[in-house]
């Protein structure tokens, strides 16, 4: 093994006790900087709000591999009875980002110790706000983090997958993600005089129903998408016509043309309803993540490295998912692959899926995650043929 198993687990537990949200990560950032300074790796915090980018072998510009970990947690109250349970009420690392950060620090420590043997530059991306409405990856990309990276890899813990196994879905593997909010603004009136007001809640309900009709009659039943409205709220009390209502929702798809169609029709339906009812409407629509495309050739190269760590029997083909990941933001600039690390272990109670308040993952898997990243760097430090990368891309062929 290359990485220090105990070091990774200890860091993960420290991070788990102090989960932080979105871009507000003061304790997490202090910990990451502390460890990088102990290791001796240079870093910058200028490539995006609340981000840290560390560089090993900055002088070697022939080829650069990026490795990314997300750092943020979720607004969930933890129910697990463990010594390292969250100490912040209502906040929990319920998606494994504490493990991702700890594994990347473990990778950094291992790579730095052998830096003289590595014939490339390695950039370690510690990213905020993967879970937030505003994408931390998008912010880092806009600040130029990908300008000098040739290939990027990311890893996520996976409780669908048995502990210590490595899985990948080649090609389009995860859906795009668009978040939206629609606000309806009307005028209050006494409930017995509804004609003297403008019912924003009624307009919101009408829009909701028209959107559902559109989804069942205007889209092919073979289209891969999800259009979900998770919240519809309005009004203040039972005897006053609501002067404000709003809805929150998300769009997921494997086809960006479908995303554009749904976004356009959502705007048209809400605006037409507002015009017909005399209501004002404001629409906020943000594309947070693109379709996540794992380059098949880079995926094969990664799995070759992973097999050296977990064995050929430890490699698994993963199915595509309608969930999304803003790691796809990096892949709009350079090719790469997003890997799954199995952390399911029924004997340890590690079976619950992410975003649940009893989410647990097998800590014994973490060192295999770090070691696989180290092995990928060692196996590919002399570069990866860009022609083979391009030839394997089905999107280019299409």
Image (spheres, rainbow, N blue to C red):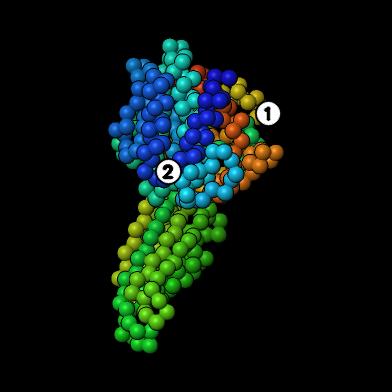
At 49% across and 25% down in the image, what residue appears?
Answer: 106
Q: CA distance from mark 2 to mark 1?
A: 37 Å
At 52% across and 59% down in the image, what residue appears?
Answer: 220
Label 1: state its secondary structure: helix
Query: Residue 321, image x and y in percent?
Result: 55, 46
Please give left or right for residue 34 compared with residue 316 in the image. Answer: left
At 50% across and 43% down in the image, what residue appears?
Answer: 86
Q: Is residue 314 visible?
A: yes
Q: Is residue 382 visible?
A: no
Query: Residue 260, image x and y in percent?
Result: 40, 55
Mark in the foreground, 2 or 1: 2
Q: Which mark is residue 20?
A: 2
Q: Which mark is residue 76?
A: none
Query: Residue 76, image x and y in percent?
Result: 50, 51
**Neighbourhood count class around disc 1 (C-alpha, 10 Å): few under 14, some 14–19, many 20 upward:** few
Q: Quadrant of the N terminus?
A: top right
Name the residue beneath numbered marker 1.
Answer: 313
């Amino acid at each position: 093994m290359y990485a220090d198993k105990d070091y990774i687990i200890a860091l993960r537990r420290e991070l788990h006790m102090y989960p932080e949200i979105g871009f507000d990560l003061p304790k997490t950032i202090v910990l990451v900087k502390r460890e990088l300074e102990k290791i001796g790796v240079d870093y910058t915090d200028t490539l995006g709000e609340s981000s840290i980018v560390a560089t090993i072998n900055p002088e070697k510009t022939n080829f650069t591999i990026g490795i990314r970990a997300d750092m943020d947690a979720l607004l969930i109250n933890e129910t697990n009875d463990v010594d390292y349970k969250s100490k912040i009420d209502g906040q929990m690392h319920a998606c494994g980002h504490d493990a991702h950060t700890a594994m990347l620090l473990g990778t950094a420590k291992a790579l730095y110790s052998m830096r003289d043997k590595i014939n490339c530059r390695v950039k370690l991306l510690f990213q905020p706000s993967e879970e937030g409405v505003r994408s931390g990856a998008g912010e880092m990309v806009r600040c130029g983090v990908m300008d000098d990276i040739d290939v990027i890899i990311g890893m996520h813990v996976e409780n669908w997958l048995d502990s210590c196994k490595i899985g990948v879905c080649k090609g389009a593997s995860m859906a795009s993600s668009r978040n939206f909010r629609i606000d309806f603004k009307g005028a209050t009136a006494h409930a017995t005089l509804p004609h003297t007001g403008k019912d924003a809640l009624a307009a919101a309900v009408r829009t909701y129903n028209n959107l559902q009709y559109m989804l069942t009659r205007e889209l092919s039943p073979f289209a891969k998408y999800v259009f979900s409205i998770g919240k519809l709220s309005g009004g203040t009390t039972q005897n006053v016509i609501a002067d404000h209502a709003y809805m929150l929702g998300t769009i997921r798809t494997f086809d960006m043309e479908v995303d554009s169609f749904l976004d356009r029709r959502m705007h048209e339906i809400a605006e037409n309803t507002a015009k017909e009812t005399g209501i004002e409407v404001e629409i906020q629509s943000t594309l947070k993540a693109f379709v996540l495309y794992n380059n098949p050739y880079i995926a094969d190269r990664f799995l070759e490295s992973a097999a050296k760590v977990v064995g050929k029997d430890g490699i698994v083909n993963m199915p595509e998912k309608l969930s999304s990941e803003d790691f796809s933001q990096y892949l709009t600039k350079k090719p790469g692959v997003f890997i799954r690390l199995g952390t399911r272990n029924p004997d340890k109670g590690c079976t619950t899926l992410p975003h649940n308040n009893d989410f647990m993952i097998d800590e014994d898997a973490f060192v295999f995650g770090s070691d696989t990243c180290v092995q990928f760097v060692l196996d590919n430090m002399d570069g990866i043929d860009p022609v083979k990368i391009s030839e394997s891309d089905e999107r280019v062929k299409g």
